[in-house]
Amino acid sequence: MLQLQVLRQNPEWVKERLAVKHVADLSVVDVILSLDEQRKKLQLEFDNNQAKVNSISKEIGTLMGKGQKEEAEAKKQEVAVLKAALQPISDRLGETEKKLQEELVKLPNLPAAIVPPGKTPAENVVVREGGVKPALPAGALPHWELIKQYDIVDFETGAKITGSGFPLYKGKGARLQRALIHYFLEYNTAAGYTEYLPPLMVNEMSAYSTGQLPDKEGQMYYMPADNYYMIPTAEVPVTNIYRDTILKETELPVKMTAYTPCFRREAGSFGADVRGLNRLHQFDKVEIVQIVHPDKSYEVLDGMVAHVEKLLQSLELPYRILRLCGGDMSFASALTYDFEVYSAAQQKWLEVSSVSNFETFQANRMKVRFKDEKGKPQLAHTLNGSSLALPRILAALLENNQGTQGIKIPAVLQSFLGFDTLQ
């Protein structure tokens, strides 16, 4: 959530940054500032009346001590009138604060200065590419045909058990999933991330704190009987570990990693982009999260990008890194880099990771703070990234490594699997 003081100090600059994210109605900034002024006036009126009540109440005690009962009774009547006036002021103050909060949470995070001003994914900026696109043999197949040939993922039975978009991994397919998860976690913990295994359901406050609510209600699976949400990413429960926490500055950075299944309704998805493993309602992902000092968050972001890049290099996959434009960024992000791997049989790029800096947006919602050198609480910065999402990684590994003798397994995974070729 944006800090009110930022809007107060430079509303026109806020509008300019929101325009980069293509916020349709920028007048909401003026509405928020107007409500804030109303709130301050009502708070002042309430405080002044309360101060009078307190002052006169002290006078009553003095008068009673002097035996001046008639004067004391008159003052009591005066206090009664003032107290009666306090309640409607308090009611109006509460209503104004509620409206202010409702409008404030609708605003997305402000994009960083280097965010491109585009509106669609086509306007994202390619930062760099790495790896070599493979030359596939004649008759090469897309992964949805390969998984049938090698009998490693059963979409039909998954659909029978649950529905479309819920795959059933089996045999060496299940082992591949387990190997990838194990390798990703080992890679992250070796870099200093502490591993967690969080709940797969979160309450409304957790979803609000990381920015999923009120932005993504339609994309999450919701259980109304308990008011819980299935997590769309481990980012949500892991970041909320430190909700309502004041850290010592010496405890920063906090580095966390977690494997979880992820659940997304993916409403409105259709066509070639959803074939096979390209888009699922349930999928596995390993996440990295950091809570850091504000002065170091962009340095940390660069480090997290380099961390994910080296992970992709170790899998021997061709990849590219994109800086997302304003119109393609998430609600909560200030700057996001997407990683895509090249799927040779489909001849297309597939997103496998997003690495983002949220600055104080999430921290302000969940009150994640640290005490600076003067002992004053300050909002921390939060960052996260996929390290990595499995379905499209598996799709690219299958397609890019297929040959006449089977599918070659990258060297870094062989010790986790016990075989070097899928046959």
Image: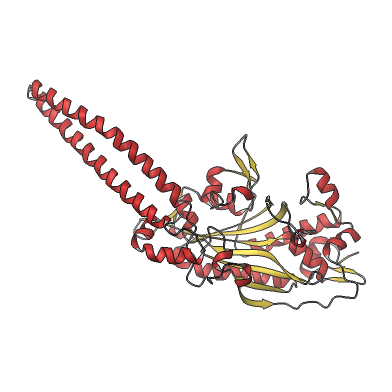
Find residue 182 and report its image quarter. Answer: bottom right
Q: Which image quarter holds the C terminus?
A: bottom right
Q: Position of residue 369 (x, y in %)?
A: 44, 54
Nearest the viewer among 44 and 152 is 44
Q: Position of residue 61 (x, y in %)?
A: 14, 27
Colour style of the rendered protein structure: secondary structure
Q: Up-down: is 61 above or below 235?
A: above
Q: Looking at the image, which residue is at 50% across and 73% down?
A: 114
Q: Up-down: is 65 above or below 356?
A: above
Q: Position of residue 12 (x, y in %)?
A: 38, 65
Q: Is residue 140 visible?
A: yes
Residue 300 placement, left or right of 148: left
Q: Is residue 246 visible?
A: no
Residue 45 placement, left or right of 100: left
Q: Position of residue 203 (x, y in %)?
A: 57, 42
Residue 266 placement, left or right of 148: left
Nearest the viewer among 88 and 232 is 88
Find residue 13 and report its image quarter. Answer: bottom left
Q: How many marks?
A: 0
